[in-house]
C-alpha cells in the first residue's frame, strides 16, 4: 500500500511539475485555438455578410459605367463621396455583423460550457481560469476587430477589381475610379476605428457580458440587458437625472459620432475623435478588468448547470 501510494504521489508530482513548466503564453495560444475551433460562427458570419454584399454589388455592377459618366459633371469632392459610398456601406455591414457576433459570443462563452457540462473537461486541462477568461475576452476585444479589418479590406479589393473589369469591358477607363476610391486612407481609418472603438471602447460591454455569462444559470441575455434598462429608468424617476443613461448611450455609440467620410480628412478625425486621450476609455478598461476578475472567480467557483 505504501509503495502504491508513493508511486501515485510521485506521478502526481511529476505531472504537476510538467504542467508548471508549460509557459503561460503557450497555454493562452492553445486556448485561443480551441476557442476559434469551437466558435466557427465568429468568422463564418462576417464572411457570409461580405459574400452577400459582394453578390449585391455584382448584380448592380452593370450600372457602374453610366454612373461614372454622370460623375463627370461633379467636382472632385462629390466624385470621391459617390465612388467611396459602396465601400463605406460594405465596411458598415461587416462591422455591424461582427459586433452582433461579439455580443452573442460573450453571452455564451462561459454560460455555454456550464450548460453542456464541458467545463468539467476543460477544467481538467492545465489551463487556469484566468487564462480561460482572458482568452475568451480577447476574441471580441482583439481578434474580431482584426478579422473585421481583414475581411473588409479583402471585400474592398474584390469590389475594386470587379469595378475595373466592368469599366474596361464597357470601353471606359479606370483612372478616375482608382484615384477617387481612396482605399489606403479608408483602411487606415477603419483599422483605427475597429481597434480603438470596437476593441478598447467597447471592452466594458464585453466584460459585462462575460461576467453575466459566468453567473447566470439561464437566459443570460435577459440578465445582461435588464439592469441596463431598469437602472437608468429608476434614476430618471427617482432623481430626474440621466447620468447613467447618457454614459451607456455614449459607450454604445462609440464615444460620439465618428466621421465615415474620408474626404473630410483623417487629421480632423484624429484630433476631435481620438478616444485614446479621453479618460472615459481608460476608466472603461479599468471597469473591464474588474468584470473579468469577477468572471474568473465565478468560473472557478461555479460548476455545471
Image (cartoon, rainbow, N blue to C red):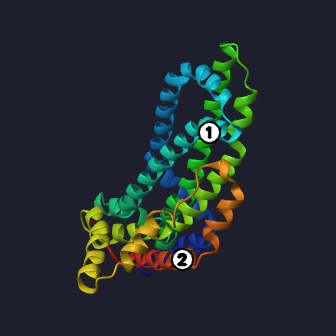
Please state which of residues 44 and 24 is positioned toward the viewer in this rendering. Answer: 44
At horizontal 54% and vertical 70% (from top left) the residue drawn is: 15
Label 2: state its secondary structure: helix
Q: Are marks 2 and 1 in contact (CB under 8 Å)?
A: no
Quadrant of residue 206 within the rendered picture: bottom left
User: Residue 151 placed where, x, y %?
Assistant: 58, 42
Q: Is residue 13 left or right of residue 234?
A: right
Residue 106, image x and y in percent? 41, 61
Residue 138 visible, this angle: yes
Count residues near mark 1 (Cα–Cα under 10 Å), then give few for <14, some for 14-19, many for 20+. Answer: many
Can residue 22 be seen at all in this image of the molecule?
no
Q: Secondary structure at mark 1?
A: helix
The residue tagged 1 is: 84
Quadrant showing the N terminus = bottom left
Mark toward the start of the polypeptide (2 vs 1): 1
Instruction: Give above or below for 110 relative to 5.
Output: above
Amino acid at each position: 500500500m505504501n509503495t502504491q501510494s508513493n508511486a501515485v504521489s510521485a506521478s502526481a508530482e511529476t505531472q504537476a511539475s510538467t504542467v508548471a513548466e508549460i509557459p503561460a503564453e503557450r497555454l493562452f495560444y492553445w486556448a485561443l485555438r480551441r476557442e476559434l475551433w469551437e466558435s466557427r460562427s465568429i468568422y463564418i458570419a462576417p464572411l457570409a455578410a461580405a459574400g452577400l454584399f459582394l453578390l449585391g454589388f455584382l448584380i448592380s455592377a452593370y450600372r457602374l459605367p453610366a454612373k461614372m459618366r454622370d460623375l463627370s459633371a461633379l467636382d472632385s469632392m462629390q466624385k470621391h463621396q459617390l465612388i467611396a459610398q459602396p465601400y463605406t456601406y460594405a465596411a458598415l455591414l461587416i462591422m455591424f455583423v461582427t459586433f452582433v457576433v461579439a455580443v452573442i459570443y460573450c453571452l455564451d462563452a462561459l454560460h455555454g460550457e456550464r450548460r453542456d457540462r464541458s467545463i468539467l473537461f476543460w477544467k481538467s486541462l492545465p489551463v487556469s481560469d484566468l487564462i480561460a477568461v482572458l482568452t475568451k475576452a480577447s476574441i471580441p476585444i482583439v481578434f474580431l476587430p482584426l478579422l473585421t479589418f481583414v475581411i473588409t479590406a479583402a471585400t474592398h479589393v474584390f469590389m475594386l477589381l470587379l469595378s475595373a473589369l466592368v469599366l474596361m469591358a464597357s470601353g471606359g477607363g479606370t483612372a478616375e475610379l482608382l484615384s477617387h476610391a481612396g482605399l489606403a486612407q479608408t483602411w487606415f481609418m477603419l483599422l483605427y476605428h475597429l481597434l480603438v472603438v470596437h476593441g478598447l471602447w467597447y471592452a466594458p460591454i464585453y466584460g459585462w457580458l462575460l461576467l453575466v455569462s459566468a453567473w447566470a444559470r439561464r437566459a443570460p441575455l435577459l440578465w445582461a440587458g435588464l439592469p441596463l434598462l431598469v437602472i437608468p429608468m429608476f434614476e430618471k424617476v427617482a432623481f430626474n437625472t440621466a447620468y447613467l443613461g447618457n454614459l451607456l448611450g455614449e459607450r454604445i455609440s462609440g464615444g460620439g459620432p465618428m466621421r465615415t467620410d474620408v474626404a473630410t480628412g483623417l487629421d480632423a478625425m484624429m484630433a476631435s475623435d481620438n478616444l485614446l486621450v479621453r479618460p472615459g476609455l481608460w476608466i472603461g478598461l479599468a471597469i473591464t478588468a474588474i468584470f473579468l476578475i469577477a468572471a474568473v472567480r465565478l468560473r472557478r467557483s461555479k460548476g455545471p448547470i
